[in-house]
Image (cartoon, rainbow, N blue to C red):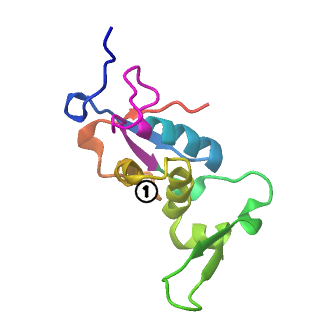
Amino acid sequence: MKTWIAKPNEVERKWWLVDADGLTVGRMASEIAQVLRGKNKPQFTPNVDIGDFVVVINTDKMRFSGAKWSDKKYYTHSRYIGSLKEKTAQQLLEDDSTKIIKAAVKGMLPKNKLATKLLSKLKTYTGAEHPHAPQKPESLALN
């Protein structure tokens, strides 16, 4: 018996729509990471990108559990000495709320070259409008 391996050109990709209004960031990010990776498909292959596209809207209305709005920190560094910058989740929400969900999903993807390809299939928007209507994204039911 031979082992079947998925090939990138044979994969049928779907578009999914997630409304982040009132959803917890971590729980939402874990399910988005599984869809991006393709773990919800029966032909899942760990070293091949067979995942689907995910569009997340209303990222400015997502929530954290507990006191993470003030306690959780996001760091940036430009590789120059003394350039470490720190922002709380509340400050990042006011600046650009899409960075919160992208950072959460990035942390749940594998740490290799495949992760950048997978993360490029995640589209995030602060409002309810998005330019991906021609792709006809289906609503993704999150638990």
Q: Residue at x 25, y 30 (%)?
A: 7
Q: Position of residue 4 (x, y in %)?
A: 31, 19
Q: Secondary structure at mark 1?
A: loop
Residue at far front of view: 1
In the image, is residue 5 above or below residue 101? above
In the image, is residue 84 above or below residue 61? below
Identify the amino acid type marked 1. Tyr
Q: Residue at x 26, y 28 (%)?
A: 12
Q: Position of residue 121 (x, y in %)?
A: 35, 48
Q: Quadrant of residue 48?
A: top left
Number of numbered tags placed on the structure image: 1
Say whether residue 30 is left or right of residue 45: right
Q: Nearer the viewer, residue 74 or 137?
A: 74
Q: Which residue is mark 1?
A: 125
| Span colored in magenta | 36-56
Q: Position of residue 76 (x, y in %)?
A: 55, 76
Instruction: Note whether residue 103 is visible.
Output: yes
Query: What secondary structure predominates along the stretch shown in magenta?
Result: loop
Q: Is residue 1 inside the magenta stretch?
A: no
